[in-house]
Amino acid sequence: MKLLHSGKVRDVYADGDDLILVASDRLSIYDVVLPTPVPDKGALLTQLSLWWFEQLSDLVPHHVLSQDVPAEFAGRAVRCRRLEMLPVECIARGYLAGLGLKEYEKHGSVSGVELPPGLVEGSKLPEPIFTPTTKAPVGEHDEFMSFTQVEELIGVDRAVRVRDLTLAVYERGATTAAAHGLLVADTKLEFGLDPAGEIVLADEVLTSDSSRYWPADRWAPGGPQFSFDKQYVRDWSAGLDWDRTPPGPEVPAEVVDATRARYVEVYERLTGREWKTSP
């Protein structure tokens, strides 16, 4: 196999006509890879993505072919088909948090979508919105895009299709999670084109790395929410003298353990399966 790309969390290898997508235990916040791994994180992301791909298979085709991967990657990698990836991060938001909150506080809108006045951190939006961003290289930051900019970048028809798919995946994910006492505040998706030009869901889907999960019974608009995702690490880092540029800080063992526990809880709540180190 040949290493084609090493991202913040995933490594991509070529294996004949297929790709092997390997999720590592690396942790990134603010587009910076931290030096401390989270044990089992790559396997948790992979196994939860596989579960979600199955739940979403009637909505959109996905890139996964099988889990037939080299033994050293077992449990944390998938064999998938090659796609021409679209240069847009497709984000759906149902609640106001993170960079979406900051953008709203500056402009009263996110990605050009006007929102009502008076919203606060954690507010539920009147309806889920599509808030795409650019795809920045490792170490740089994504920037919000308007829908018009997406149309200009990938064409009107494809822009409409990825917007509609992003919102459909979010709605399915939010409805499914709600049945397990979880709110999906937002989620980030990636799409690519197959050789026939069909839009295909790729990368990861509705994981604790790509989504904000909040316990529904603790949701309280007006401040930070308890989260089952890497927001916990972002909040920890806020108390440090760190300018959010590389190199990132070492993460204490207790923060690593708490982060892993939150990823495990989301996996177990959603899938109904007990987490084992080797799925």
Image: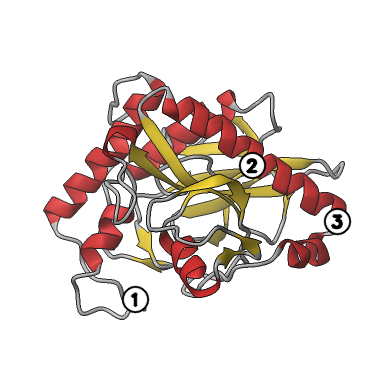
Please, which colouring scheme is shown?
secondary structure
Q: Who is closer to the viewer here, 117 or 135? A: 117
Callout 3 crowding tier (Cα within 10 Å): few <14, some 14–19, many ≥20:
some
36 relative to 18, above or below: below
Q: Residue 156, which numbered label?
A: 3
Callout 1 crowding tier (Cα within 10 Å): few <14, some 14–19, many ≥20:
some
Locate residue 39, reporting x and y percent: 26, 45
Q: Residue at x 20, y 51 (%)?
A: 256
Residue type, label 2: Leu
Q: Residue at x 50, y 74 (%)?
A: 106
Q: Residue 98, which numbered label?
A: none
Q: Residue at x 78, y 53 (%)?
A: 159
| Mark 3 vs 2, N-terminal side | 3
128 left or right of 174? right
Q: Which residue is mark 2?
A: 167
Between circles 3 and 1, the one closer to the viewer is: 3
Can the viewer see residue 67 in this picture?
no
- Describe the element under mark 1 as helix, strand or loop: loop
Cα separation, mark 1 vs mark 2, equals 30 Å
Q: Who is closer to the viewer here, 168 or 102? A: 102
| Mark 1 vs 2, N-terminal side | 2
86 relative to 189, above or below: below
Quadrant of the snapshot with the C terminus: top left
Q: Decide: marks 1, 2 in contact (CB < 8 A)?
A: no
Q: Which residue is mark 1?
A: 244
Locate residue 43, reporting x and y percent: 38, 38
Spot the residue most to the top: 272
Q: Residue at x 51, y 72 (%)?
A: 141
Residue type, label 1: Arg
Between circles 1 and 2, the one closer to the viewer is: 2
Cα separation, mark 3 vs mark 2, equals 17 Å
